[in-house]
Amino acid sequence: NGLMAQAQNAAFAAMTENSTCTTGQDACVNGTFAQCTGSTFSLTPCSSGLSCFALPLLNSNGTSISCDTEADVESRIQAAGVEGG
């Protein structure tokens, strides 16, 4: 899950609000939560001090997308057995 979160965060870093998407797809675009509706991302800013990231799930396979601090994201990914954010 840690590697999956890292890969998603790397992919998110290359995305813009004009990136192609599929309806129902969630992502992080420029640190903002993004949800695709009709092949266009709708952006929802995170609360102050937080940015959007993919996080490794703890009790099942996969990731979740959430607003969090970079330090907490790095801690969660390391707790999943992977180095780096």
Image (tube, rainbow, N blue to C red):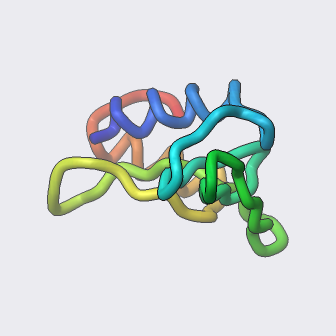
Residue 14, how many percent across, how many down? Answer: 69, 25
Q: Is residue 8 above or below residue 38?
A: above
Q: Residue 5 in the image: x percent, y percent? A: 41, 39
Above or below residue 67? Residue 74 is above
Question: In the rendered picture of this protein, how many numbered marks are placed on residues?
Answer: 0
Q: Is residue 67 left or right of residue 6?
A: right
Q: Residue furthest bottom?
A: 47
The location of residue 60, given as percent across then percent down, is 15, 57
Query: Residue 68, percent across and down?
Result: 61, 63
Q: Residue at x 18, y 49 (%)?
A: 61
Q: Residue at x 71, y 33 (%)?
A: 19
Residue at position x 59%, y 40% from top?
Answer: 21
| Closer to the camera in the image, 38 or 51 | 38
Residue drawn at (50%, 51%), measured in percent from left and top? 25
Outermost residue, right direction?
Answer: 48
Q: Is residue 60 left or right of residue 83?
A: left
Which quadrant: the N terminus? top left
Farthest residue, direction left: 60
Quadrant in which residue 59 is drawn: bottom left
Q: Decide which of 69, 40 is in the foreground and name it.
A: 40
